[in-house]
Amino acid sequence: MRDTLRFLLGAELIEIANCDPTVTVLDWLRLERRLTGSKEGCAEGDCGACTVVVGRLDGGRLRYEAINSCIRFLPTLDGCQVLTVEHLKRADGSLHPVQQAMVDCHGSQCGFCTPGIVMSLFALWLNEDAPSVARIEDALAGNLCRCTGYEPIIAAAQRMSAGGGDRPDREAVTARLRDLSDDETLALSGPRGRFFAPATVARLADLVTAHPQATLVAGATDVGLWVTKGMRRLDPVLSLGRIAALQEIADRGDHLVFGAMATHAEARPVLASLSPQLDELMRRFGGEQVRNAGTIGGNIANGSPIGDLPPALIALGARLVLARAHPHHSPHPEEAALAAVSKDDPEGAGASFETKPPASPQDEGSRVIARREIPLEDFFLDYRKQDRREGEFVEAVIVPRPRPDALIHVSKISKRFDEDISAVCGAFLLRLDAAGRIAEARLAYGGMAGTPRRAAAAEAALTGRRWDEAAVNVAIAALASDFTPLSDMRASAGYRLKVAGNLLRRFLIETTQPDVETRVAGQLAEAAHG
């Protein structure tokens, strides 16, 4: 067990023995280190003014990513490198090529958002040479600028690659981060609570059993707002970010396995291989900073009725792997010691489980992990209520590979195209038989009920019919018996029901009349326009 947080701030080794579990990276940078270039605009990961770049080891390779420091908890940076706008200046004090390009192209006016924009472009500069305009727009979608406008900023992004500049010594940074890596459980405490970050699934299982009231944190893109907006006190916090086994993505031939900690950015190209519709959905997950931090497991486990990924995965027939410490197994001595100092009851009630091999390779020693596998749609019981038994956590998602003849459609409807929450998300999969009739229909929606749900009546109405306008009309009529949506700030109930039906019409048009344009923005629209 290790009681000291360790990470690199630029080239400086930071070691912190006492740390509150939910202090944000932004607050620590500004208040403790007086690095005030990073700004707080929204405190919810929307505006990008707080953007910093984090370097982390991914399978032994150094990966640099832009993240929102306003909702990222400082202890989750263990074993990482953090770069702020202050680290960009050259040894002689001159501007970095990204900053110089912003000056040359007049990419800043009031300047409040500029450091965050610079850091998003710096991450792009680190990872890609001569990015396209579309790629630049993607990288900037998580940065709001209300006075300059994006044309000069995009021009700066196009110019920055020509400015040269010294790249970080990746080998040296990789070696230093490797020296910080270990298999110990990180255990911190501060005036506002405790923080645990195990390095294996088995030790996570023991900690969840020992601390049943703990908040499990993946990328903190949702939980972070509980603190910055809801002012909630979370104690203890269990972070999943150090468990390499949960970050794995595996192709098993007829299905894909996503570890719960696979980020949206990492999952996107894999899901895109199944359908360009999924690629478009993943591109519209928040801004790039959110996609770099948010995870597949987190998007499912938080149980939001408007999470975008569950409807798509339900339509694909995904299954969820839930894990926990075996109820008759004694915890590892390290976790037993942690439980002894806890006020929690370490005993967990629960039904017996079938013990299965690990979903992904990991060293679990002599301890036994109990797992069960359920259809994803069965996980969501009611609003913010899931079928998660005592001590369980989401370990992995299994996604069947669709048959080559499957028709797939995904649509996200929101007030703003980029970086917005869905009013309605529809995801559909159809399979036709040799006679052209619908042999299988899976229609899943988000935003239409208290949980992501399949439209059972509409599916039944489609099955056995030819895929045509008449079938769509019957299915649309059935949607009213499937859902009674609510009215809220995003959409009225009537609008949601109308849109849900219209998405089926769009699906029909796109699969039977490919020359008809149904989208006005995004990758699918660009592909249709040639």
Image (cartoon, rainbow, N blue to C red):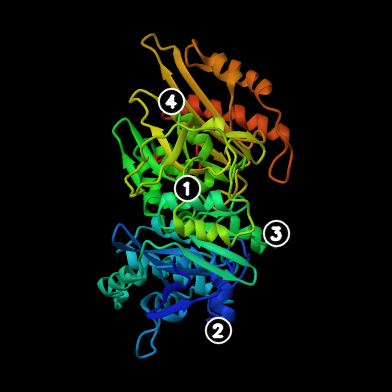
Could you tell whether 148 is left or right of 14 in the image?
Answer: right
Q: Quadrant of residue 180?
A: bottom left
- Find the residue positioned furthest to the left: 171
Residue 109 place in picture, x, y as percent: 56, 76
> Could you say which is closer to the camera, residue 89 or residue 380?
380
Mark 4 residue element: helix
Q: Earlier in the sequence, mark 4 or mark 2?
A: 2
Residue 361 place in picture, x, y as percent: 32, 45
Q: Which residue is mark 2?
A: 34
Q: Earlier in the sequence, mark 3 or mark 1?
A: 3
Q: Earlier in the sequence, mark 2 or mark 3?
A: 2
**Res. 511 mark:** 4
Whole-angstrom CA distance, mark 2 to mark 1, is 46 Å
Q: Which residue is mark 3?
A: 230
Residue 336 place in picture, x, y as percent: 50, 56
Mark 3 residue element: loop
Mark 4 in CB contact with mark 2 (< 8 angstroms): no
Give me the residue at 45% from left, 57% from top.
Answer: 333
Mark 4 in CB contact with mark 1 (< 8 angstroms): no
Q: Which residue is mark 1?
A: 330
Mark 2 in CB contact with mark 3 (< 8 angstroms): no
